[in-house]
Amino acid sequence: MRSTAGSTTPTGTATRPEPSARIRRFSTAERWIHRTTGYLMLVCLVTAACLYLAPLAQLVGRRHLMVTLHEWSGISLPLPFLLGLFSREFRADLRRINRFAVYDRQWLRAVRRRRTSPEARPAGKFNAGQKLYAGWIAGAVLVMIFTGLLMWFMGLLPFISRTSAIFVHDLLAWAITLVVLGHMRKALQDPEALLGMRTGYVSRTWVQRYHAKWLREEHTSSSTSADDRRMT
């Protein structure tokens, strides 16, 4: 039985690290952005299932309500992201996610070769898999909103048929469902990461093991800032 990072007892759930051993991973704004986006995505997927799957449609009924919830939750998906741009921490993490480093390619090679040790999979604040997931889900959401608007407002772009929009929308919905389920599975396998998203803090030992590059970046940044303050 493995021990959770930040805990001395083998357990399946992470415990809150001691204050001296904690590192702030996410700000309050970032956690609310993630949480709100997750809730909106969940409403989209559940209402889509109620509209698409006949047994669920018969069980739930109230098709008009399901359609309304699906449309408005879908069109609201970018809202947490847009509001998050007012957060300095969120903008900094966006820059991290949009930047692929040399060690990210090493992480991907290790995944391809099925090497699972942390040493074989170096990572900054976000590993390469998380960066790819964020980019893919952002693009998928934009396509879903675009095709959804074509279905909602027929005739918006006459040269694109409603049938084509429905086909792309439905196909991508299944892909998003599978990818989101995979994301949730990965999150549940890492209680420390869940703790970080819930409280904003993670243990230093966990960061040193799985995100050592980020720890070095933070140390370098802090040293540079301290030097700048001394010079002024």
Image (cartoon, helix red, strand yellow):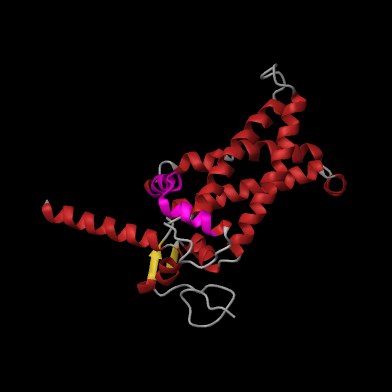
Q: To which quarter of the image does residue 213 belong? A: bottom left
Q: Nearer the viewer, residue 14 or 227?
A: 227
Q: List the single residue furthest toward the top.
A: 158
Q: Is residue 156 left or right of residue 232?
A: right
| Rendering coords of residue 219 (x, y %) | 29, 61
Residue under the point 77% across and 46% down: 49
Q: Nearer the viewer, residue 213 or 93?
A: 213
Identify the image quadrant of the N terminus: bottom right
Q: Nearer the viewer, residue 190 or 48?
A: 190
Magenta span has 33? no
Q: List the single residue furthest toward the bottom.
A: 9
Q: Is residue 177 left or right of residue 216?
A: right
Q: Is residue 17 above or below residue 182?
A: below
| Rendering coords of residue 108 (x, y %) | 52, 54
Q: Is residue 227 above or below residue 135?
A: below
Q: List the single residue furthest toward the front.
A: 113
Q: To which quarter of the image does residue 215 belong? A: bottom left
Residue under the point 39% across and 50% down: 89
Q: To which quarter of the image does residue 25 belong? A: bottom left
Residue under the point 43% across and 64% down: 201
Residue under the point 57% across and 43% down: 136
Q: Is residue 2 above or below residue 29?
A: below
Q: Which residues are magenta?
A: 89-110
Secondary structure mostly seen in the magenta stretch: helix
| Rendering coords of residue 130 (x, y %) | 52, 53
Q: Is residue 7 left or right of residue 175?
A: left
Q: List the single residue furthest toward the left.
A: 231
| Rendering coords of residue 162 (x, y %) | 75, 25
Magenta span has 94? yes
Q: Is residue 107 above or below residue 10?
A: above
